[in-house]
Amino acid sequence: MKLSVKHSIPVIFAIAIVTTTGVVEAQVLQPKPELREAISLSSPFSSMSLPQIEKLAIQTNPTLAQAESMVRGAEGRRKQAGLLPNPVVGGEVENFAFRALNQKPTYLGFVVQTIPLGGKLRKMRNVYSAEVTQAGIESESQKQRVLNTIRALFYRVLGAQEMLDLQIELATLARDATATTSELFNVGQADKPDYLESSIEKELVEHEVVAARNSYLQTWRTLAVLLGTPEMTPVRLSGNLEDRLGPVDEAQLFKRLIDQGPQMKAAQAQIQRARAVVTRAKAEPMPDLFVRGAMGYSTEFLDTGDAGRPPRTGVLANAQVGITLPIFNRNPGGIASAQSELLIAQREIDRLKMQLRIQLASAMRDYNTALDAVTRYRTIILPRADEAYQLQKMKFAQMAAAYPQVLIAKRTSYQVRQKYISSLVRLQQGSTQLDGYLLGGGLDVPRSQFEHGELTGLQGMMGSEEGDISSLDENHNVDHY
C-alpha cells in the first residue's frame, strides 16, 4: 500500500514580500542540515512479493528439513519393526575324549531361529505406521508454522516500510517548511518564534525518520534471518496491507479448526498409535517359536555286532522345536500402562478442543479490535485529519495562521496515517493466525512422537525377539528364553 501525500508550500508569499519591499537586510541564520538519505535498496531483487518470500523460506528453513528427517526416521523404524530376528549360527564339538581324540568326537554346525507368533511383528509394524502418520502431520504443521511466521513478519516489514516512506515525506515537508519560514523571517515577515518552532518540528521529524529507519532495518534483518540469508540487502516489498479486510465467523473458524486443524489431526493420530500399542501389548504373552537345526559328522564307532572293525557313525542331523510358556509373565503391567496411555490420548481430544476455543477467542479479540480501528481510521479519522490540514493551510493562505500550525496539522495527519498502518499490520497478522490454524513458531524444533517416552507397555518386547545362544544347553535343548 502506498500512502501518498499532496502538499504545497506557499513560497509565493515570501517572493511577493521581497518584490514589494525591496532589498531587506536579512538576519544570518544557521545553515540547514541536510536530510539523511533514504535506505539503499540495492539488491539482486528489485522488489519481493509474499509468494517469493514464502518460496525462499520453504527452501531454507532448517526446521522443515528436520521435520522431513523425522518422517524418514519413522518410516525406517516401521521397516525395521517388520523384520524377523536374526538367526544364530554356530558350531560345536561334543564327546571330545582326551584319551581317544579320534574315537568319539562329533562335529556339528547349527542354526537357531526365533519366530514371533501371535502377529507380533505385524502389530508392532502397525505401531510404527501410526508414528509415520504422526510424523507426516507434524511435518505439515511445521510448514504451516513457518508460513504463518513468515507472513506475519512480511506484513510487519511492509508496515515498517510504509512508515519509513511516510516519515521521509514528512521530513521533506518539514525541511521545505523550515526553509520557507526562514525566508519569511529574513525579510521580516515572520517572527523568530515561528522560525524556532518550525526548526524544532524539523528536528523532531528527522529524529523520527532515524527511528523509523532503525525499526525497518531491525524488522528486515529478522525476516532475512528467517529466510536463511542474514546478509541480504533490504529490498522493497510489494504488497497491499488493505487486502483481506472484513469480519469473520468465529463459529466457522472453530469448526474448521476441529475438522481440518493439524492439532486435531495429530491428536487423532496419537489415539490410533495408542490403540496399536494396546493391541501389541496384549500380544506380548503369546508364545514365540524357537526352531533349531543341526548337521555334522560323528567319529564314534557303531556297534553293529559284526566281526571286524566297526564303521563310524558319519553324517548326522537333528532338529528341535520349542515355545515359551507364558506362565509367570503375561505382561499385565505393560497392558495396563498401554491402556492408560490410550485413555490419556482420548481425553486429549477434549482438552485440545477447550484450548483451541480459548486461543481462538483471544485471536478473535485481537482481530476484531484491529478491524474496528482500521474501519474507524479509514472512514472517519483519516478524512477528518486531512480536512483539518486543509483548513489550516487555507487559514495560512489568508494570513490567519502561522505556518508552523500548518506543519503541526500535517504532522498530525501523518501520525494518524501511521496509526492506521499499525492497525493494518495487526489486522493482517491476526488474519494470518486465523487462516493458519493459530499455529506459530517458525523456528521451533518440530515435535517428535518420542517426546513422551518409549513404546508404552512393550517393555522387554525387543529382548523377546532376539535369539540368544546361551539359551541352549550342551545338548542343544531349548530350556529357557
Image: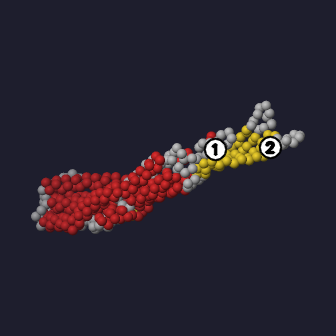
Q: Where does the image place residue 387, in percent across and percent down from the top left?
A: 17, 67
Position of the C terminus by quadrant: top right
Query: In the drawing, does residue 24 fall left or right of residue 99?
Result: left
Query: In the drawing, does residue 468 fall left or right of residue 151?
Result: right
Question: Could you tell me which secondary element the residue under label 2 belongs to?
Answer: strand
Query: In the drawing, does residue 178 fall left or right of residue 95?
Result: left
Using the numbered discs, state the Cα–Cα distance from disc 2 to disc 1 in whole angstroms: 25 Å
Q: Where does the image place residue 142, in percent across and percent down from the top left?
A: 42, 57
Q: Residue furthest right?
A: 308
The residue shown at (57%, 47%) is 325
| Mark 1 crowd level (few <14, some 14–19, many ≥20, 10 Å Cα) | many
Looking at the image, which is closer to me, 221 or 246?
Answer: 246
Position of the N terminus by quadrant: bottom left
Q: Where does the image place residue 410, in percent across and percent down from the top left?
A: 20, 62
The residue shown at (76%, 34%) is 97
Quarter occupied by residue 396 = bottom left
Disc 2 to disc 1: CB gap under 8 Å:
no
Q: Which residue is the site of mark 2?
A: 313
User: Is residue 36 visible to the viewer in this orientation of the structure?
Assistant: no
Amino acid residing under circle 1: Val
Q: Where does the image place residue 460, in percent across and percent down from the top left?
A: 52, 45
Q: Which residue is the site of mark 1?
A: 478
Amino acid residing under circle 2: Thr
The residue shown at (46%, 56%) is 275
Quarter occupied by residue 174 = bottom left
The residue shown at (30%, 65%) is 251
Disc number placed over residue 392 in the picture, else none: none
Question: Could you tell me which secondary element the residue under label 1 belongs to?
Answer: loop
